[in-house]
Image: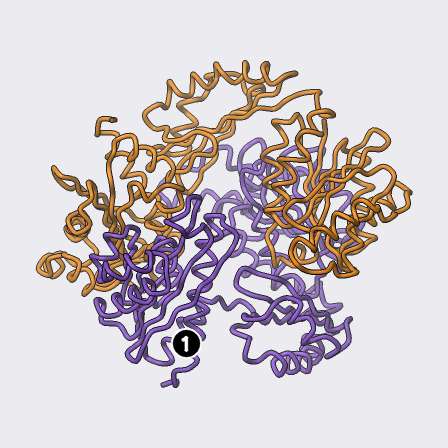
Chain colours: A orange, B purple
């Protein structure tokens, strides 16, 4: 089934908001048997909306829109769908009633403008929105389906999961696309490419190789008449990739490096504390992005000044003789924070985010240190001296070093 | 001049990568006199690309593409442009030479596949790429302009600034759009709307009001024959908005809350240190996103456990009698971190990011504390209990509370 997405809103066209809804849907549609070929972004103008819908209906079986379902005059998605199908919009008494209930339950009276959200056309049915006031539409006509979803990501995602996917399973049954992503580190894009080259054909499954901030990713895409058939095509290719790259694969599909570290720490019953300088708290923040991280994360120190490093246990003599951005200092940071928080592992980061150098050390240089009961080690890295790149890459490097160290520890 | 954007790449259609290039360009085109009416995302398939280009040429004066300029078989942007204009692609000897130089300067030999990037058609001219191997194209034909830029954001942005804007000024001179964004806090969207309602007409300048995580934003958009005329239309409306909302406006245009806090601290010669719990280091990380923050940021503690709060100076009796997520504890955190880092201000955050409650306190609740030489204060907040929302909103609240406090301190 051929699909396309339309993100609606002048704020998207002005670049004020980045359209993340389309990426969310695009990731999920292939597994439902929908091949997404076009994504459109259009403003709140009725002529432009009608043009996009007409174009979409001429080339796609399914159109999913996000946005333009609010109560104000510039919310025109319903109006545009009614026009392209030549149908008349009417207020649905039941829907109006449930909207009024929504406001009543929140202790207020529905503003008159919200009555617009109770509109339907004969070919549309309601997709209910338990998280907001904008109901969605499921419209089927002339062998085409239009699904209109709200623009607020939390509302849209909830409606997608609970309302759209059951209906879509009923119409999109021609073929299913299944994917598997492998995330690696320690290899270049060309090294990964050469390793897997010729392992299997290049059509189905299709293999894509992408460079990402957290390493090289391989994505397998298989298309079959059923989920079973698509998975059957994936399986042998997956096995070959795992065999060829096993020691470099750290995660599969949605898994993040933070998840991986969290799992490895939990499996080994280990705790961690961190002392970070140039990353300014971003490593702690990334680790605590994982729900349940309080079980293993003992805490952190952002030692942004020399003084605060000394106050938190780093020997001033080490700073004096090696410089504050050095392997010796980062190892001392890791050991000090491990001791002061009483954790199994200590992690340190020191470096130069820029734009100015620190002493003799140029922006882009950073060190990662890991301390444990039996010792300490460190690594040195250099990345392009852009402040946000240095911060992000230093955090990724620290997480990768943590994975590498944790691999050497027995599970359980 | 009517413009549209085309982001090219199957990884965008699969939702693997979010298209941020289009937002970058969409923000900058109106000031060049280009009204962006459509943004398209399309995969690496030649038929789909040709269809999108034909459609674009039928409705827009200017098309800007990003992506599809690499050396591999699935990089088809050049091919598609050649087809829609019915021109033949040929290798340009000068361009080939400069590509070979690019590789030679990096100590390697150009792989044969990169020769593809030295291609031109008769109507195209080169946009040079000092940051990568993919040159861009500027194509003018039949009163239409197509600009093809690389997909890597750093390369694209550099080419936009240095190569595209000078050429675009020569063709896009019909009208200029200027904008001004005001960022506020402390008011609801409807309160802002009512305050500015009827202050001026609703066409030119046009006023948009948007809810953002860091408060309500007002965006003025004015269109004039010249930059001077557009600015002349903006000025009186700006003055009225400032008059009506002055005490609630914290920033203009690209300014972030972090920038604002950094400026206010610097102007007052004050330093700060933070102790944060549920935000896990994100407040420290946000403060240190600002270049030069080492001048005022003394450091931070991520006190993720009760123990680490006590170890960092919070009285265990206060935790016992008030609970770890409370106004008393957050004030003690702010005072303790101020003392231990010897800073002028101390900031504390404690709360429940979720998904589980902490004691009796439900996810979504958090407290912000600010301590200074003369005292301490705190605020309580509740937001929807989604882990990443709680973290982000707590950081925004802390920055806003810091602004509010700093306003009471004299500058200099």
Q: Is residue B142 left or right of residue A252?
A: right
Specify the quadrant that holds the N terminus of chain A.
top right
- Residue beneath the point at 68% across and 60% down: A108
Chain identity of mark 1:
B
Q: Residue A270, how many percent across, how many down?
A: 24, 36
Q: Quadrant of the C terminus of chain A?
A: top left
The percent coordinates of residue B141 (x first, y second) are: 75, 51
How many neighbours does mark 1 have within 10 angstroms: few (below 14), some (14-19), or many (20 or more)? Answer: some
Residue B86's quadrant in the figure?
top right
From this viewpoint, is residue B139 visible?
Answer: no
**Outermost left residue:** A317
Say what secondary structure mark 1 lies in. Answer: helix
Q: Is residue B30 above or below residue A351?
A: below
Q: Residue at x 51, y 47 (%)?
A: B152
Q: Position of residue B344 (x, y in %)?
A: 28, 75
The part of the image, by quadrant, that contains residue A144 is top right
Query: Horizontally, is A336 left or right of A187 in the view?
Result: left
In the picture of the structure, the residue carrying the numbered disc 1 is: B405
| Viewer-proximal residue among A372 and B112 | A372
Indicate left or right for A217 with A169 as reference: left
In percent of the image, x 78 and y 71: which residue is there? B203
Rendered image quadrant of residue B160: bottom right
Residue at the image position 46 percent from the left and 56 percent from the top: B392
Residue A396 position (above or below residue B251): above
Front residue of B301/A80: it is B301
């Amino acid at each position: 089934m051929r699909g396309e997405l339309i993100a609606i809103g002048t704020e998207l066209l002005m670049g004020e908001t980045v359209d993340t809804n389309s990426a969310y849907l695009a990731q999920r549609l292939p597994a439902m048997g929908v091949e997404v070929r076009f994504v459109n972004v259009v403003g709140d103008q009725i002529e432009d909306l009608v043009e996009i819908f007409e174009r979409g209906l001429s080339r796609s079986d399914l159109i999913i829109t996000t946005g333009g379902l609010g109560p104000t005059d510039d919310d025109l998605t319903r109006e545009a769908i009614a026009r392209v199908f030549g149908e008349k919009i009417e207020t649905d008494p039941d829907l109006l009633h449930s909207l009024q209930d929504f406001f009543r339950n929140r202790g207020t009276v529905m503003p008159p403008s919200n009555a617009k959200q109770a509109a339907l056309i004969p070919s549309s049915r309601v997709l209910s929105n338990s998280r907001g006031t904008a109901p969605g539409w499921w419209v089927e006509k002339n062998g085409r389906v239009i699904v209109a979803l709200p623009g607020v990501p939390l509302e849209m995602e909830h409606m997608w999961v609970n309302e759209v996917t059951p209906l879509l399973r009923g119409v999109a049954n021609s073929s299913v696309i299944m994917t598997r992503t492998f995330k690696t580190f320690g290899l270049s894009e060309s090294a990964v490419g050469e390793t897997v080259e010729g392992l299997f054909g290049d059509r189905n499954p299709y293999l894509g190789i992408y460079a990402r901030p957290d390493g090289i990713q391989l994505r397998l895409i298989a298309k079959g008449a059923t989920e079973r058939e698509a998975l059957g095509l994936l399986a042998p290719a997956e096995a070959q990739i795992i065999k060829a790259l096993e020691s470099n694969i750290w995660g599969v599909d949605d898994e993040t490096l933070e998840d991986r570290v969290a799992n490895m720490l939990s499996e080994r019953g280990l705790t961690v504390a961190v002392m970070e300088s140039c990353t300014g708290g971003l490593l702690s923040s990334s680790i605590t992005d994982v729900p349940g991280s309080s079980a293993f994360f003992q805490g952190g120190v952002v030692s942004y000044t020399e003084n605060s490093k000394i106050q938190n246990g780093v020997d001033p003599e080490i700073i004096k003789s090696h410089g504050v951005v050095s392997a010796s200092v980062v190892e001392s940071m890791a050991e000090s924070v491990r001791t002061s928080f009483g954790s199994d592992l200590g992690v340190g980061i020191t470096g130069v985010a820029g734009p100015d150098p620190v002493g003799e050390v140029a922006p882009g240089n950073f060190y990662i240190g890991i301390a444990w009961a039996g010792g300490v080690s460190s690594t040195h890295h250099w990345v392009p001296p852009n402040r946000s790149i240095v911060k992000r890459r230093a955090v990724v490097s620290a997480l990768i070093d943590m994975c590498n160290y944790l691999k050497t520890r027995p599970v359980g």
